[in-house]
Image (cartoon, rainbow, N blue to C red):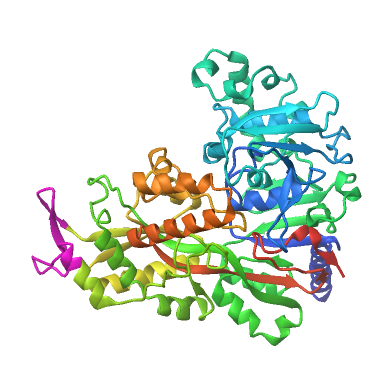
Amino acid sequence: MKLVCSALFIAILMVITSCKHEVPNNTMVVHILNEPTDLHPCNGSSALRSELNLYTQVSLLKTDYNTGHLIPCLAKQLPVISNDGLSFTFELNESVLWDDNSPILASDIAFTAKANKCLLTNNQNNKYYWENLKNIEIDPLNSKKFTVTMSKPYILNTWFWIDVPILQESFFDAQKTLSKYSYEQMADSVFLKTKNDIKQWADTFNSAKYYNNPQFLKGAGPYKITKWDNGVSLTLEKKANYWTKNCSGTLFCQAYADKIIFKINSNNASTKLDLKNGLIDVSTMVDFSTFNELNNDEVFSKKYIMTLANTYNYLYVAMNMKPDGIKHKKIFNDVNVRKAMALLTPYDQINKIIYNNSCKRAIGPVSIFKTDFNENLKPIECNINKAKELLLEAGWKDTDNNQVLDKIIDGKKVDFEITINFMATQKQWEDIAKQLAESMQKVNIYAKLNPVDYNGFVGAAMNHDFDMSIGAWQGSAQPEDFSQLWHSKSWITNGLNFTGFGTPQSDSLIDKINVSVDESKRIELSKQFQEMVYNEQPYVFLFSQLRRVVVSKKWSNIEVYDEYPGVLLNTLKLN
């Protein structure tokens, strides 16, 4: 028996030892809550995809995370702008190469623009930015020089390039199909119906292999995706040869970790255990209770750096302003009801219980940390009695004494019963929904909580299939284009204007902001728009989100930024 036990002990010891060696020394393990919906370089839209693009893709320009200003990346320098503000001349850095050591050329930029602009490409969330691109002309004497011409002035005519992964034409369009056609033709639906070659190209480009097959997830960044274990992890490995080795002066050229493993875990308890056991190197996604507990743990604090960082993001509760009246009742089409919801929200209580009083209030659709934030707008405070008055003014009473408000709408008695959507993986959002529901109950409103997965959450919002929906928007230092979130076109086309906010006046103001290249004028108009949103209350604006940054002290060179994702993993060095 003693020999058997000894043999078993040795076997267990060997397993434990082998497990320790599964993670090589210069491998970084990063905690994430969910995997990205896809990693298509053109068609995807999730926030995590944007972070992975920082390491696997490259763009013409980037945001300087220290200053918030534009800086060149693939480009040698910032573009030379014509006197009319419509033409932008770029020249590519001489040293930039694709993985096969072929140079990145102006023809790749031209292909990238056509691929994004083509109406047959499934990148509907990003199409808006390409509508204004008129032409790209390549210098006949310099294959790395080109001029981008836009149709009209626009505040993001240069900024939008920071989010565009540049595509290798020889990989994504070996037959050079798109090069035969103009940019105007890419946006002509009638013309495209007659071109089978473009349709065949688009069918291939939109196919699943470019969404999640590591073999086809190509980019010119210093890292490549080598493994995607669905629901478990994503692995990035540093390329043996990559052009950014010869690049200096920008954070995005660096690549110190040999391997970065993004480990998926939405369970707070097991994430906390992994951190305590040193199995996670970096997390910006632990919940606040876990963060606070670990921050007060002296043993843990000796091993990890922990900080709360400001962001340009904000947390909100959207209300369906244009319900169909059948599946979703005509409740939040009344501005007084929407204002009552803001007054019913227990902001201080939420901040204290869920966020340990660490969050700053969000006031409107612009981050309080941006220069164009309208400081004249004041945070709405919880006021149950004032909410009751507004609801009564809007015609809501408990006429049948069933403890639920009701009202005659379109000839029928309607009870004030609603559903609050939120992502099931976001524990804080569930806690917020519970507190909202409890507060609403004080005025005889019944709210049902509806946790859904990421795809269900986004699908319901974009299809206007909700009453209230808790979410968050990721912001940045770049000038605000309010079109995607607030223009009425974005509601009609099932875009990101979930609520249905928008009038001819607000649309006109957005259009004016977008062409106001004069900074002072743009800020003035932006403040007017913020006041318009504030008065209409399409959202309950909750908090400016804080990023919970946890990094193992075995990594050095740690900098924390307001810009997403807060920590640039490629810049961390193993001690």
What percent of the width, then of the height, locates residue 404? Answer: 18, 66
Image quarter in which the N terminus is found: bottom right
- Above or below, comparing residue 225 to residue 429 in the picture: above
Left or right, 470 with respect to 342, comes to right
- Residue 127, located in which quarter of the rendered image? top right
The residue shown at (80%, 64%) is: 572
Magenta-tinted stretch: 391-414
Left or right side of 209 for 171:
right
Q: Residue at x 67, y 66 (%)?
A: 283
Left or right of 525 in this view: 319: left
Indicate whether 280 appears above or below 450. below
Percent position (x, y) of residue 384? 27, 76
Q: Nearer the viewer, residue 505 or 547?
A: 505
Q: How many marks?
A: 0
Q: Is residue 381 visible?
A: yes
- In the picture shown, does residue 61 fall above or below 403? above
Look at the image and say whether residue 225 sits in the magenta stretch: no
**Quadrant for the C terminus in the image:** bottom right
Rendering quarter of residue 241: top right
> Residue most toward the front?
83
Residue 399 among those drawn in magenta? yes
> x, y percentage for residue 25?
86, 63
Q: Is residue 496 visible?
A: no
Q: Nearer the viewer, residue 382 or 230?
A: 382
Q: Position of residue 487 (x, y in %)?
A: 42, 45
Residue at 78% x, 61% y: name it.
28
